[in-house]
């Protein structure tokens, strides 16, 4: 039996269970906190930093996706400071890759694209990096275009935690980080990939997509994930 | 019945007997710096020479640890005459052996009655240069492992923790978290197993304090770790050492085998019910693995990336078990605290920062090397008394403390007491103990750029602000040093500093802006000179062309 | 309030002209606009020289060549408000896809490797390409950003009307990158 706690989010009284995160409780109460790397059904890694919130009495900002609620907690999700940081973080994502929305398979359905609108990013003040990144089309059915990858690692996690294949992982470090299949070999040669397409569908951008999809044609289906996790936990 | 005290006593006596046979003891530094200066050849030359003169029964020639005066390596220490020789070459062996019992060899002699040696206080580096790091007997004869037996036989784990708490010891890895409190938290945590990890992933540029402890006093470190394990109730432990320290790895592995042989590690340690298994893990070279959660991931065989805290390792660490993780220097303090008592330890240092701190003193300073001073010693004393001031008649400009995430402290704060709070109050931090001295030929923008380049290339890439932010910051600093930046760029740089500092996941990103912030705070005019006047006041940066924009 | 009509302009840098098409899609409301503003310079009209004292200039396209650079600097100097119209002006968009590769690679591909009869990279008349395609704000100050590829006619009409009415348009809900 978990304990019910009451707390305040943006001065609104809310309640949640002790083992829930701030993000869980906020969503149950229709309080929006932006997220990019988080996905229901996968472990939380706190990497994108968009869900940072202020908690009274804590000197550091905390990620709502990883910090559990506590009795009497006072959380603020929309302070000017947070809004400023979120805009900068989204700008950083755009400046880092080669995000050309107009020619992207998920144009109109992209989480990064809508996040820009949501946090009010209408242009990128940071200089663009224009990195030369690779594209792997060797898989029979799917493509990874690293130009559009924001390194949320949802693909890495879904492949490891749900599919159990661990085909995806990260290579390089810092600004050179990139997702790799197996030991940085071609996806099409992968002996571990089961072709389940989970990675493609959890990908928030057009970095992973099905072959044969043109601009705006790729719709991602993620409904399976929470159910899959729930059913497994029940077992 | 096996009595470990008796065994230690026996080794102690044997050692004394052995040592007593010799009239002279020659210790050749086998620390990494002296080894690089060919001290191993000096050692064998001295052995050959002693034998050639038929003195092998009169004088012992052994390897010893570092004396701190790395600038004078290779160093040789003579006992009991307390003579220190510097810059010794193999062909000096004849003169050294010939002079035994007489006047020291003048050209090699390094006086030890100067502030460099007199102003230091050694706890972590006690007996420096006089213990052969590859012999457990040397350490035992110097009173080693008595603290462990005292803890095991006379104190409960809670008493050990209380003693550490009362001593006021704070973590030496950088953040200065109270060690006793950390131990207590791990002791309270519940788990089928508990782990102790010693963080030996020292990676700050110019820092080699922990390396010297691991190289010179492996047994002192082991003793501290074992006491820690006993206090928190851990049964397994890892010593995480970076791969760049092969000598440390070798000596620690040797020390572990020696300790196991003496029943000071393993099952039923020293005849008690306490079991503790300790292993060395070698890091693969990522700076971020010095961050505790990344270090834990690395031991687990995962990519070395930090994760958000809470939960803290004390609650859920290695493989999810409660884990005590302390830095090398922290553990190296434990034995002395148990032996001499918390009151003794708490009498050293300042009100909030107790004990001593080891610094790697580098840069433009006369006596660069390794020093240990009581907390609260001023920067002026460290740089000008112990360090011998700035060479070549140059002027002091700034001291950089705290590694790549630290800050630059200008001349007006030379009388600042070196302790956790004071350093933080001027925008720097204690860090692990790197202390880089810079003279007036240093360009502060260039210094900030250097550290940002380090952070940028060492960022693991997990969180956006550190991965992308440090890269942008570096680019702007690069533009400034080339005379291509505008005042708008400076504004953007400050905004980036703010975001990266407050939104990064781990200490690496959170502290990466510090070199920029502290140089902006004290040397803003240098930034402006680069941007507006296209001049580098220190004459370091070269501007190839006029700014284009 | 003066009875003098506001002077507005549009220019076309490195873009596909889709934003101008979208602007024309304002349709009959162009007549309403014409009552309060004069279009004093535009690829849609036949003025040879960019005039002085322009109230609002809508800029389509990214800054990709030396000519673009000269133009936009001149326009900035003579416009009160500059609007980055569409993704090319705001982000660099499709023209900027050459940035990771560099100018040489794309020129060679376009002029030398396509099996043309007399392959040569043009060096006369055609303006030189800049090493990097940049959004307008990376070169001159921009007052209003209208992302979209292209922005809807609605959005553009709203932007112009607001600016002419002396208000800064709030576009947070109206448009975004890409769509």
Image (cartoon, coloured by chain):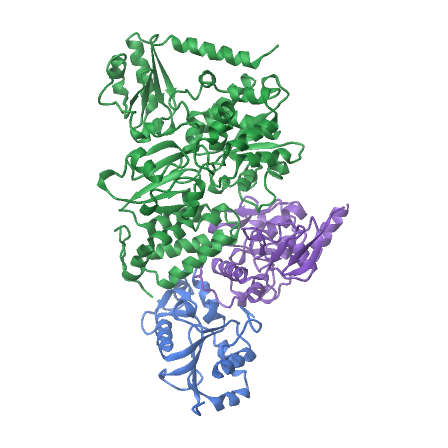
Residue B219, horizontal then vertical, whole percent = 48, 23
- The correct choice, above or below, for B373 with respect to C47 in the image is above
Which residue ends up furthest to the bottom in the rendered image? C3
Q: Is residue B420 visible?
A: yes
Q: Which residue is pictured at 35% across the width and 57% down the height?
A: B479
Which residue occupies the foreground of this view, B506 or A105?
Answer: B506
- The correct choice, above or below, for B143 with respect to A114 in the image is above
Q: Which residue is pictured at 35% across the width and 19% down the height?
A: B27
Query: Looking at the rendering, which quadrant does residue A39 occupy?
Result: bottom right
Q: Which residue is pictured at 45% across the width and 30% down the height?
A: B347
- The correct choice, above or below, for B163 with respect to B515 in the image is above
Which residue occupies the foreground of this view, B1 or C60?
Answer: B1
Residue B467, horizontal then vertical, whole percent = 48, 52
- The correct choice, above or below, for C172 with respect to B223 in the image is below
Q: Is residue B101 left or right of residue B452?
A: left
Which residue occupies the foreground of this view, A121 or A190?
Answer: A121
Q: Is residue A138 visible?
A: no
Quarter that holds the C terminus of chain A: top right
Residue A81, horizontal then vertical, whole percent = 52, 60
Residue B159, horizontal then vertical, whole percent = 59, 27
Count of residue discs:
0
Q: Is residue C77 left or right of residue B1?
A: left
Q: Write down which chain is painted blue.
A: C
Q: Colour of chain B?
A: green
Which residue occupies the foreground of this view, B431 or C142?
Answer: B431
Q: Write down which chain is painted purple.
A: A
């Amino acid at each position: 039996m978990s304990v019910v706690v009451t707390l305040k989010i943006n001065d609104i009284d809310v309640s949640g269970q002790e083992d829930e995160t701030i993000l869980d409780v906020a969503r149950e109460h229709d309080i929006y906190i932006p997220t990019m790397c988080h996905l229901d059904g996968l472990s939380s890694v706190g990497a994108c930093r968009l869900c940072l919130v202020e908690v009274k009495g804590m000197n550091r900002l905390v990620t709502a996706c990883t910090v559990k609620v506590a009795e009497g907690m006072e959380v603020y999700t929309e302070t000017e400071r947070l809004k400023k940081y979120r805009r900068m973080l989204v700008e950083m994502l755009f400046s880092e890759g080669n995000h050309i929305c107009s020619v992207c398979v998920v144009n109109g359905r992209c989480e990064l694209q809508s996040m820009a609108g949501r946090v009010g990013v209408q242009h990128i003040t940071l200089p663009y990096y224009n990195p030369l990144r690779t594209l792997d089309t060797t898989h029979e059915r799917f493509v990874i275009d690293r130009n559009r990858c924001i390194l949320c690692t949802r693909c890495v996690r879904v492949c490891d935690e749900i599919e159990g294949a661990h085909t995806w992982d990260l290579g390089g470090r810092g600004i050179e980080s990139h997702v790799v299949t197996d030991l940085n070999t071609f996806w099409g040669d992968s002996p571990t990939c089961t072709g389940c397409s989970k990675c493609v569908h959890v990908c928030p951008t057009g970095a992973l997509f099905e072959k044969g999809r043109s601009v705006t044609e790729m719709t991602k289906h993620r409904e399976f994930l929470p159910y899959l996790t729930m059913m497994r936990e029940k077992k | 019945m096996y009595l470990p005290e008796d065994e230690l006593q026996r080794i102690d006596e044997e050692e004394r007997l052995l040592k007593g046979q010799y009239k002279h003891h020659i210790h050749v530094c086998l620390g990494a710096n002296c080894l690089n200066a060919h001290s191993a050849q000096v050692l064998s030359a001295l052995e050959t020479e002693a034998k050639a003169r038929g003195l092998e029964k009169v004088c012992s020639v052994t390897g010893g640890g570092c004396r701190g005066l790395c600038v004078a390596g290779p160093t040789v220490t003579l006992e009991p005459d307390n003579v220190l020789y510097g810059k010794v070459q193999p062909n000096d062996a004849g003169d050294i052996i010939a002079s035994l019992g007489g006047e020291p060899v003048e050209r090699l002699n390094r006086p030890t009655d100067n502030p460099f040696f007199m102003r230091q206080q050694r706890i972590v580096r006690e007996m420096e240069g006089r213990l052969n790091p590859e012999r457990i007997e040397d350490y035992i004869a110097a009173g080693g492992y008595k603290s462990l037996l005292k803890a095991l036989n006379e104190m409960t784990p809670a008493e050990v923790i209380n003693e550490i708490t009362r001593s006021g010891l704070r973590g030496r890895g950088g953040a200065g978290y109270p060690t006793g409190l950390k131990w207590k938290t791990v002791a309270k945590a519940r788990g089928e197993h508990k782990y102790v990890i010693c963080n030996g992933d020292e990676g700050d540029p110019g820092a080699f304090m922990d390396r010297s402890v691991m190289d010179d006093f492996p047994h002192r470190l082991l003793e501290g770790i074992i006491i820690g394990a006993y206090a928190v109730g851990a049964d397994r432990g890892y010593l995480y050492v970076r791969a760049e320290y092969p000598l440390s790895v070798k000596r620690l592995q040797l020390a572990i085998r020696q300790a196991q042989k003496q029943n000071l590690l393993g099952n039923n340690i020293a005849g008690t019910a306490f079991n503790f298994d300790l292993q060395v893990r070698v890091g693969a070279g990522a700076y971020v693995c010095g961050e505790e959660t990344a270090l834990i991931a690395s031991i687990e065989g995962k990519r070395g990336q930090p994760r958000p805290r809470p939960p803290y390792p004390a609650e859920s660490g290695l493989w999810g078990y409660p884990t005590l993780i302390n830095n090398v220097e922290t553990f190296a303090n434990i034995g002395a605290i148990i032996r001499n008592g918390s009151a003794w330890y708490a009498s050293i240092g300042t009100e909030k920062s107790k004990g001593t701190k080891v610094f790697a003193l580098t840069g433009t300073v006369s006596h660069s090397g390794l020093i240990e001073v009581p907390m609260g010693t001023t920067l002026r004393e460290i740089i000008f008394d112990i360090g011998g001031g700035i060479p070549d008649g140059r002027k002091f400009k700034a001291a950089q403390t705290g590694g790549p995430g630290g800050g630059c402290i200008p001349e007006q704060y030379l009388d600042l007491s070196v302790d956790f709070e004071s350093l933080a109050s001027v925008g720097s931090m204690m860090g692990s103990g790197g202390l880089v001295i810079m003279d007036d030929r240093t360009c502060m923008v260039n210094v900030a750029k250097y550290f940002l380049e380090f952070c940028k290339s060492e960022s693991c890439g997990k969180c956006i602000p550190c991965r992308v932010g440090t890269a942008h910051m570096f680019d702007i600093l690069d533009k400034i040093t080339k005379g291509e930046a505008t005042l708008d760029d400076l504004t953007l740089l400050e905004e980036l500093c703010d975001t990266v500092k407050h939104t990064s996941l781990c200490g690496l990103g959170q502290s990466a802006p510090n070199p920029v912030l502290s140089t902006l705070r004290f040397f803003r005019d240098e930034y402006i000179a680069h941007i507006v006047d296209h001049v580098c006041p220190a004459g370091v940066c070269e501007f190839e062309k006029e700014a284009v924009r | 309030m003066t009875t003098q009509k506001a002077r507005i302009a549009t220019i076309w840098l490195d873009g596909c002209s889709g934003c101008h098409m979208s602007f024309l899609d304002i349709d009959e409301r162009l007549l309403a606009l014409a009552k309060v503003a004069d279009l004093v310079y535009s690829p849609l009209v036949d003025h040879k020289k960019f005039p002085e004292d322009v109230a609002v200039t809508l800029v389509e396209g990214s800054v990709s060549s030396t000519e673009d650079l000269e133009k936009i600097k001149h326009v900035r100097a003579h416009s009160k408000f500059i609007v980055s119209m569409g993704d090319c002006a705001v982000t660099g968009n499709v023209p900027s896809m050459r940035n990771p590769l560099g100018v040489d690679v794309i020129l060679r591909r376009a002029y030398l490797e396509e099996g043309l009869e007399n392959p040569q990279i043009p060096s006369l008349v055609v303006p030189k390409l800049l090493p990097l395609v940049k959004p307008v704000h990376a070169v001159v100050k921009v007052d209003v950003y209208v992302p979209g590829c292209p922005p809807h006619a609605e959005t553009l009409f709203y932007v112009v009307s607001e600016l002419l009415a002396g208000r800064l348009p709030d576009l947070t809900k109206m448009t975004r990158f890409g769509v």
